[in-house]
Image (spheres, rainbow, N blue to C red):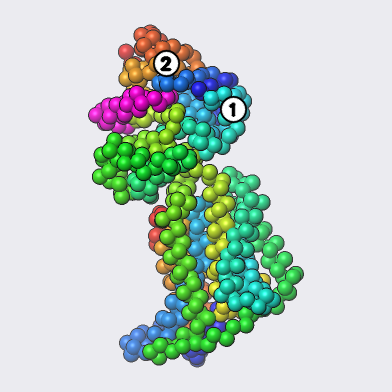
Amino acid sequence: MGHLVTSVAPLPLQGGGLGRFIDPFVQFLTDITNLEPVLLQLLAFGLLLGGVYALTALGLTMIFGVMDVINFAHGVFLVVGMYSVWLVSEMAGISPFLGIPIAAAVLFVLGVVVHVLTVEPIIEAPQQNQLIATLGVLFIIQSAIEIVFTPDPQQVELSLGSIQVGGVFIPLGQFYALVIALGTMLAVRAFLNRTDLGRKIRGTADNRDGARYVGINVRRINYLTFGIGAALAGVAGGSIALFQRFDPFTGETYLINAFVIVILGGLGSFPGAFVGGLIVGMIQVFGGYYLPGTTAQVLIFLLFIGTLLVKPEGLFGGAEA
Amino acid sequence: MLELSGVRAGYDDIEVLHGVDMHVDEGEIVALIGSNGAGKTTTMRTICGILSPSRGEITYRGEEIHSKASHEIVERGIVQVPENRDLFTNMTVIDNLLLGAQTEEAKADRKENLDEMLELFPRLAERKNQRAGTMSGGEQQMLTLARALMGEPDLLILDEPSIGLAPHLVQEVFDVIEDIHAQGMTVLMVEQNVQQTLKLADRGYVMENGRISMTADGDELLEDEGVVEAYLGV
Ligand SMILES: Nc1ncnc2c1ncn2[C@@H]1O[C@H](COP(=O)(O)OP(=O)(O)O)[C@@H](O)[C@H]1O
Ligand SMILES: [Mg+2]
């Protein structure tokens, strides 16, 4: 993800010692007081990345919200989304944009199958069982992709170029990914709030026994939610493929950040996933520019641990799905 | 209509019900009373498929239902007001009511039934866009009852519907039960308000330690010395 900030020349590394960590903050404050144009550029990159991050977290938080399952396979679902879009555009010659709904459909089916085969049989077991089962799915699918497509990075051939808005440089691939992410999030929100099925999903997330008492087929809600969560990973992965190279293991970094976002925003919370995505995106972009090496990622983990210690329920904890 | 025979059920390895026999006939109000921990709630949960019996049989209108999932039991017309309410606390009153209508018939009548419920429980109408979890205990109990009625049950199961309510609300709950029964609904209820319940009920069962220890008409139970001593606090 360092690729994002390479378009703005990173600050030269200052000397060694603590100064390496203090100087960037001094620099940051100076830039703010001087209203340096680079800030606007970084803000734009942060928004572009954060929006997509939010989408990577959405399916994860939804599955957790409804069935308390921590789905490690989510990372590789993202990767299947990337490869689906790539396959569709490279092999079938269809536009990668059309590949995204195809990726969603593929992932929906895969999600339902994974759920029925691995999660459902142990849905009443302790949480760590499901966690380990989904981790197993992650490794199996990841290896399968590696065997079939080699571990080499792939790329969707798409030269979208970029535009300049008021001196701010916006790569169009990322811009479209952000638009898709925001559109998808709004659509999911409308689906959950306005449709009967959406209401049933919210009800099951709210109170499983309550759902049983009113006669909701909770088993069906479970696999549909798993399918929808996976489909969202398909859209997220497919959008990422519009602007980034990927390999079978790309999902791991995204999965980790998605976990941070979900914890930060509050497990099961949609607004939380959105705000969490933006925060993590901003830290990554600003940190990548001002801080040496991978310090930004360290900052993200510190934030993660800090949230768990200080406000384990997250920013929007307890909010409805 | 509903028949339990030799039902054994419990939690994990602990058996709570050691062979329960009881039945409810069409159009009746049947009361189940018994001290705390006797197994009344476990019985109600087992009827509705939240728990499944390890032994014994439950039939509804002649059809075996003990191996059915909870939503299949609701489809057949049995709906419960559970003891701990199990409302959708983060959702609005309206959402809770709409979620009560899951069967095809109930969905078809959803609009009219919703209006009817808001008329029957004016306090719910005032709070229709409020989150259920933010309402008072009494209002939540009314909502649980209304949510169950949205399912258009043929057999309504009530597990301590008046628990923790102020006396005037207890009366309101009993009035509603009497009303819906008068409209032809069959009712099976667990209650701590033994006197009031047995007056209303056609028949009653007394449960002790996971077994039915006595059964008789409501009036007879009200006059039974053992029942009076144990449950009416005389
Ligand atoms: N979820 C549970 N897990 C284990 N034991 C339970 C659970 N719920 C109830 N019990 C036990 O089952 C017995 C019967 O409880 P219950 O059916 O709730 O009684 P009642 O409704 O008559 O007060 C009690 O001994 C209680 O401790
Ligand atoms: Mg009880």
Which badge, 2 or 1, comes first in the chain's sequence?
1
Q: Which is nearer the eye, B152 or A200?
A: B152
User: Taking A171 as reference, is A223 above or below it?
Assistant: above
Q: Amino acid at mark 2?
A: Arg
Q: Amino acid at mark 1?
A: Glu
Q: Quick one: quadrant of the C terminus of chain B?
A: top left
User: Magenta residues?
Assistant: B164-189
Q: Residue at x 47, y 13 (%)?
A: B214
What residue would you read off at disc 1? B64
Instruction: Please tell me whether mark 2 or mark 1 is closer to you in this view.
Output: 1
Where residue B140 sits, quadrant-wise, is: top left
Question: Residue B203, which numbered label?
Answer: 2
Q: Position of residue B53 (x, y in %)?
A: 58, 29
Q: Secondary structure at mark 1?
A: strand
The secondary structure that most of the magenta stretch takes on is helix
Where residue B199 sits, quadrant-wise, is: top left
Q: Which is nearer the eye, A63 or B69?
A: B69
Question: Residue A29, which numbered label?
Answer: none
Q: Which is nearer the eye, A131 or B197?
A: B197
